[in-house]
Image (cartoon, grey):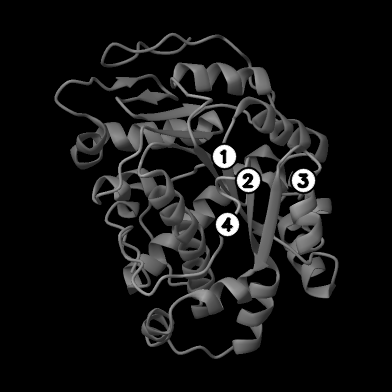
């Protein structure tokens, strides 16, 4: 039985989560990614005052890894920045497979405000995130305001405009229920974020999720970061490495090329999609910013970084016409999300 919830609490159904054999390995990828992000932040690749609350990185990663994560974070947040400017904050953000991502807290330190910010992940992940937030006043203070309470349960947290909830993205009834608890507005412009999430979902379940979003939301953008070009020798090495850790890429069939990545969305009712490999994303970052981070560490294996960049991509899909021009072209001063 769940312990009593704090601060008023929320009602929970008693849905039993049926974990697939490799779910625990997928969940563990959050720790790996968070650890890598924390390490890059400590070296000065970008600013994040909050990641340290969630992970205590000790092991220094290879420079190729740090640059890869820099491009990943920068690429996703370039898209977020443009979406927020276009909507003037009259929007909502839904972070799928959020892990220990800190975007909400960093946005609170900027002029950018959104109507609603929703984060979803496996309950075992959100439980840890809830626990960390509950223990740290600096995090709670960003969620709480004078008029609104923060309601906590073991796996879910609800603030005035921030909602963190445990859910299996393969269970659409459960996703719908959680979004209703978070007071989602299906008519409001919405940006979905997913970093290495869809690739772990079985193809049919992924199609069901993307079709469901396309049917429910009127105007939306989906920013997806994950693997691409997985049908060559380097891709085989990546796949074997993940499989050795008990982690199969159930959705890898959509990661064969940039075309299969965009078709995944177009075939599920999205109005359009475009994609870039991370070579293109990195090259789109301002010269001054690239020069700054390239001075942080000496890079011995330039070829390895190139191969990594060629095997990850950024996809932007959209519903309607309002966001069809959202792309990765970088403005010279793109610092309002505090990652410069």
Q: Secondary structure at mark 4?
A: loop
Q: Is residue 326 above or below residue 250?
A: below
**Residue occupying the point 84% across, 71% down:** 232
Q: Which mark is residue 325?
A: 4
Under circle 3, the secondary element is helix
Among the two numbered marks 4 and 1 on one chain, the one whose residue lies closer to the N terminus: 1
- Nearer the N terminus, badge 4 or badge 3? 3
| Lower position in the chain sequence, tag 1 or tag 3 | 1
How many residues crowd mark 4 within 10 Å: few (<14), some (14–19), many (20+)? Answer: few
Labelled pair 1, 2 in contact (Cβ < 8 Å): yes
Distance between the alpha carbons at the discs numbered 2 and 3:
9 Å
**Which element is circle 2 on?**
strand
Residue 180, compared with residue 334, is above or below; it is: above
9 over 78 or under it: above or below: above
Which residue is the site of mark 1? 220
What residue sits 82% from the left and 67% below the top?
236
Looking at the image, which is closer to me, 46 or 100? Answer: 46
Local crowd size for mark 2, using a 10 Å CA cut-off: few (<14), some (14–19), many (≥20): many
Q: Which residue is mark 2?
A: 318
**Is 17 placed left or right of 290 in the picture?**
right
Q: Secondary structure at mark 1?
A: strand
The numbered disc on residue 266 is 3
Q: Is residue 335 left or right of residue 19?
A: left
Whether residues under marks 4 and 1 lie with C-beta atoms below 8 angstroms apart, the answer is: no
- CB atoms at circles 2 and 4 under 8 Å apart? no
Q: Nearer the viewer, mark 4 or mark 1?
A: 4
CA–CA distance in space, label 4 to label 3: 16 Å
In the image, taking residue 76 as reference, residue 156 lies left or right, namely: left
């Amino acid at each position: 039985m769940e312990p009593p919830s704090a601060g008023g609490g929320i009602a929970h159904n008693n849905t039993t989560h049926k974990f697939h054999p490799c779910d625990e390995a997928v969940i563990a990828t959050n720790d790996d990614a968070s650890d890598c992000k924390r390490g890059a932040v400590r070296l000065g690749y970008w600013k994040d005052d909050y990641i340290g609350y969630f992970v205590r990185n000790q092991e220094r990663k290879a420079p190729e890894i740090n640059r890869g994560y820099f491009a990943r974070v920068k690429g996703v947040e370039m898209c977020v920045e443009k979406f927020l400017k276009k909507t003037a904050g009259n929007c909502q953000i839904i972070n799928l497979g959020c892990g220990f991502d800190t975007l909400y807290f960093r946005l609170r330190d900027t002029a950018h405000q959104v109507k609603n910010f929703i984060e979803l992940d496996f309950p075992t992940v959100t439980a840890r995130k809830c626990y960390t937030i509950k223990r740290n006043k600096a995090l709670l203070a960003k969620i709480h305001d004078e008029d609104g309470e923060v309601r906590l349960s073991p796996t879910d947290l609800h603030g005035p405009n921030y909602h963190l909830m445990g859910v299996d993205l393969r269970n659409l009834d459960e996703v719908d229920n959680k979004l209703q608890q978070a007071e989602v507005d299906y008519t409001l412009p919405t940006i979905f974020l997913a970093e290495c999430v869809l690739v772990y979902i079985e193809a049919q379940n992924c199609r069901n999720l993307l079709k469901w979003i396309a049917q429910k939301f009127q105007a939306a953008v989906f920013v997806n970061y994950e693997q691409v070009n997985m049908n060559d020798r380097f891709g085989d090495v990546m796949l074997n490495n993940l499989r050795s850790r008990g982690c199969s890429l159930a959705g890898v069939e959509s990661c064969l090329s940039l075309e299969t990545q965009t078709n995944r969305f177009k075939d599920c009712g999205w109005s359009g999609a475009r994609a870039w490999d991370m070579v293109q994303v990195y090259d789109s970052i301002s010269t001054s910013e690239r020069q700054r981070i390239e001075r942080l560490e000496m890079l011995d294996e330039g070829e390895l970084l190139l191969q990594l960049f060629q095997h990850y991509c950024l996809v932007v899909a959209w519903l309607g016409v309002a966001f069809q021009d959202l792309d990765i072209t970088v403005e010279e001063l793109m610092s309002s999300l505090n990652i410069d």
